[in-house]
């Protein structure tokens, strides 16, 4: 099977060079044509992997990555001339799977593409359905980073999704602050105690903004518990 790669890059020369190289290695490739219709073109092509630039016309790559994550769980690799640590953090926070800095060696691009496709569709693939957690009329799509309420889809940031995955997955049990910190940040020693409070407040606000009746209870001295709508009085 030939894997399909979708390139979202506004530098025509780079896009064509990438496409030409990938086609030599037996990939099928499509290049974005209309930067107003990134999601529509991507859905129509149904790629196995997306290469996404950050600096794009109209909206940036972070925005489009969030939009794509509402429709696909395929690997998304950012390719950008931006090389700052925060650029890479934002890329991952907004749903990206990897980051390649321009100028790049095509061998690195090919190796990363092969690695992600192997994990998603090849011998390292778990061969299982998309992970989701259901609670009443709420469904959390983990790979998409989307919370669905009825027919409404609520986009989530990476940390919002991790928090809800932990809380909804353990409900009605309490999830400790230590467990949340461990899952949210690799090195807890550099995390301010208030950082978790800020992230939890953002999740609560997101639920309120979308009129989700479920809520997150603070259990003093223990942690947090997700309360499904059926238990909210």
Image (spheres, rainbow, N blue to C red):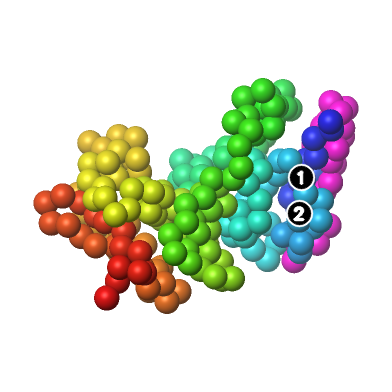
Indicate whether residue 20 is drawn in magenta.
Answer: yes
In the image, 23: left or right of 14?
right
| The N terminus: image quadrant | top right
Where's residue 111, x and y in %? 68, 24
Answer few, some or many: residues within 10 Å of disc 1's Cα (few below 14, many 20 plus, some between 14 and 19): many
- Asked whether residue 116 appears in the rendered view, the answer is no
Q: Are marks 1 and 2 in contact (CB under 8 Å)?
A: yes
Q: Which mark is residue 47?
A: 1
Is 169 above or below relative to 213?
above
Q: Residue at x 47, y 44 (%)?
A: 89
The numbered mark at residue 42 is 2
Helix, strand or loop at label 2? It is helix
Q: Which residues are magenta?
A: 16-36
> In screen coordinates, is 95 left or right of 214?
right
Q: Which of 169/85 is in front?
A: 169
Q: Within 10 angstroms of label 2, few (less than 14), some, or many (20 or more) residues?
A: many
């Amino acid at each position: 099977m030939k894997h399909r790669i979708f390139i979202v890059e506004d530098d025509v020369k780079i896009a064509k060079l990438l496409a030409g190289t990938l086609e030599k290695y037996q990939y099928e490739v499509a290049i974005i044509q209309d930067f107003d219709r990134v999601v529509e073109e991507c859905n129509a092509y149904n790629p196995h992997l997306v290469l996404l630039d950050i600096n794009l016309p109209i909206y940036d790559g972070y925005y489009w990555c969030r939009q794509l994550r509402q429709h696909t769980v395929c690997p998304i690799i950012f390719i950008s001339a931006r090389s700052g640590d925060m650029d890479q953090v934002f890329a991952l926070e907004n749903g990206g799977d990897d980051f390649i800095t321009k100028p790049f060696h095509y061998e690195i691009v090919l190796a990363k593409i092969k690695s992600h496709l192997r994990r998603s569709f090849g011998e390292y693939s778990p061969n299982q359905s998309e992970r989701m957690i259901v609670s009443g009329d709420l469904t959390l799509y983990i790979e998409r980073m989307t919370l669905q309420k009825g027919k409404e889809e609520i986009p989530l940031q990476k940390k919002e999704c991790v928090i809800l995955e932990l809380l909804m997955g353990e409900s009605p049990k309490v999830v400790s602050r230590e467990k949340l910190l461990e899952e949210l940040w690799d090195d807890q020693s550099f995390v301010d105690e208030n950082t978790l409070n800020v992230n939890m407040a953002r999740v609560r606000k997101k639920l309120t903004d979308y009129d989700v009746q479920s809520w997150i209870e603070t259990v003093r001295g223990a942690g947090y518990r997700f309360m499904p709508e059926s238990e909210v009085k």
